[in-house]
Image (tube, helix red, strand yellow):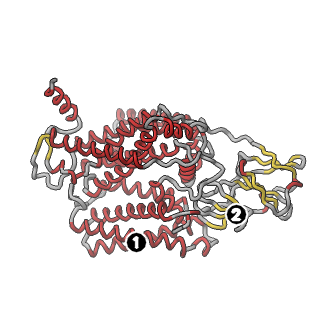
Amino acid sequence: MNNTGTQKAITRLLLHLHPKKIDVQAIKYTRTFGLGGIAALLFVLLFITGLLLRFVYVPSEKEAYNSIVYLQNDVLFGQLLRNMHYWCGMMLVIVSFLHVIRVFYSQSIYFERRKNWLYGLLIMFLVIMSNFTGYLLPWDQLSFWAVTIMTNMLSYIPIIGDGLASLVRGGSEVNEGTLLRFYHFHTGLLPILMVFIMSIHFWLVRKTKGVTVADPSKKEMVNTNPELIYKEIVVALSLILLLILFSMAVDGPLLGKANPLESPNPSKAPWYFMGFQELLLHMHPGFGIFIVPVLVTVFLIYIPYFKNIEVNVGTWFNSKSGKQVVLWSTIYAIIFTFALVIGTEYIFKFQAWLPDIPVLITTGLFPLIIYIVPTYGFIYLVKNKLQANRVELIMGLVTILLTAYLVMTAIGSLMRGEGMHLFV
Amino acid sequence: MSFIKKITRRSFIKKAILTIVSLELVYVFINLLKKGETKNKPNLYAAGEVELFEKGQLYPFSTERFYLYRLKDGGFLALSTTCTHLGCTVQYKSKENKFLCPCHASAFDKTGNVLAPPATRALDILPITIDNGVIMVDISNPVKRAKHNSSQITYA
């Protein structure tokens, strides 16, 4: 046994990812909660379980559903394998999202980290696309109608919408061609793209000298191996253990085989798109699916490029008043979004009140204005009352957007029953 | 404009070639994806003879995904069951006398007009031709429309 040789090999291999010595502040668990690393681990787990699933799964309209049933009932540990893949996929969406908001609130996206923020957003997009393309593959009622709803949402994008929707589906409705196409995106193109962009993402983290710390002047360097490596191993093993236990207990959902003649009641998009589906109940699709998401995306991309900002890199919420701003924004967004959802559900009926005005204005522009005007007022109030600076106001605005989306997701997935009626 | 000054002849040619090659690749990929799309040739479905259908009645053809409605004046209307909102399959509720979408609660009347949002367009119609007294419905080419009007009705 040549233990020192093995030790050396491991250390040198890992040092491609980590520096030899590392700041104590940087490896404190609550600094990052290890979210980026967890996401990377989940990606690896998904890769392995996905590779195994490919041996059983048949991507065809006739056989897809049967192959999943066969996997669950007749293959040794088949159900566990599918559950692992399913829950890892769902967890990856959540963890990536938490990772995005962690770097945002700890101000780790400015200056030399700008570029990595953009790559991060791109990876977040690819994660959602991977999850969504995988969603269709079991070809049951749940997945079939979720994908029907989602791809039809695309057709509301002005001018290119119809073409784009049929390009994604490979036809005017979801059929075998769509299944095959999603399968190849899910198991070929998207993973390869992600490996490529993740490599750049990691390299850029190294290039900017690791994660942000609140006080870079107080440096106390320790050896990466074992100080950081041990932490990583503990987190990774606990996560894998938890995932296996969870997958043993909870099965991934599988309804009856897809039937294009009958939509289940209610039919819902995948949960991470429920915010959109909820928005669509209150807003013209041209706004809900195109104008609002484009504005939000442009805003997110532009955040690190704002001028005249006083950033406190590495400090959660920038300062004490920043914390207050985020707290109040969350409270405001929860109450106001909830009130507006109920308001547009029962009280405001612009389309019925003003039938002569185009629907794009009555159900599109009016709800948008009803949201924007009080929010602008709130931001103005926060600016004066809490003496918030620009960075903190941006944080407040992002908080409002995220909270609003989460509230709509919760309402859509938990409070809507048959016929998508509220509180049934 | 500082970024214009930076462009030299060499870098311009480099960037131009790179752009053209990328566009070419994107174009090729999009055409690859288009493969599945075929031009919808008319796919005629024989619904039955004109006399079979009573006036003012609605007949479901669920496997072909349309409803045939014979109006009180004898005209015919073939309504697609695909909801114009997000593509779920609507169902006729005879108690409430309207089409209901299970996904987002859109409602349509017997002629396909919107009764309740979020749908913004009336149900699509399928072109009807009458051949020797038999009603032929083209199930592959739904026609989009904003509202119902009498020009969309086919008479025997």
Q: Is residue A297 left or right of residue B38?
A: left
Q: Is residue A175 left or right of residue A389?
A: right
Q: Residue at x 16, y 30 (%)?
A: A7
Q: Residue at x 34, y 36 (%)?
A: B8
Q: Are marks 2 and 1 in contact (CB under 8 Å)?
A: no
Q: Residue at x 18, y 39 (%)?
A: A19
| Residue A193, placed above or below residue B67 | above
Give the secondary structure at mark 1: helix
From the viewer's side, name the closer residue of A195 and A183.
A183
Q: Which residue is mark 1?
A: A335
- On the image, the x and y values in percent for residue A169 come to 57, 43
Report the amino acid beneath label 1: Ile
Q: Judge whether residue B58 can be spotted in this image.
A: yes
Task: Quadrant for residue A299, please give it.
Answer: bottom left
Chain under numbered label 1: A
Report the amino acid beneath label 2: Lys
* Foreground tag (2 vs 1): 2
From the viewer's side, name the closer residue of A88 and A385.
A88
Give the secondary structure at mark 2: strand
Q: Residue lying furthest top in this view?
A: A1
Q: Which residue is mark 2?
A: B93
Report how far apart the C-alphas of labels 2 and 1 lie in the structure: 37 Å
Q: How many neighbours does mark 1 have within 10 angstroms: few (below 14), some (14-19), or many (20 or more)?
A: few
Q: Judge whether residue A125 can be spotted in this image.
A: no
Q: Is residue A122 left or right of residue B91?
A: left
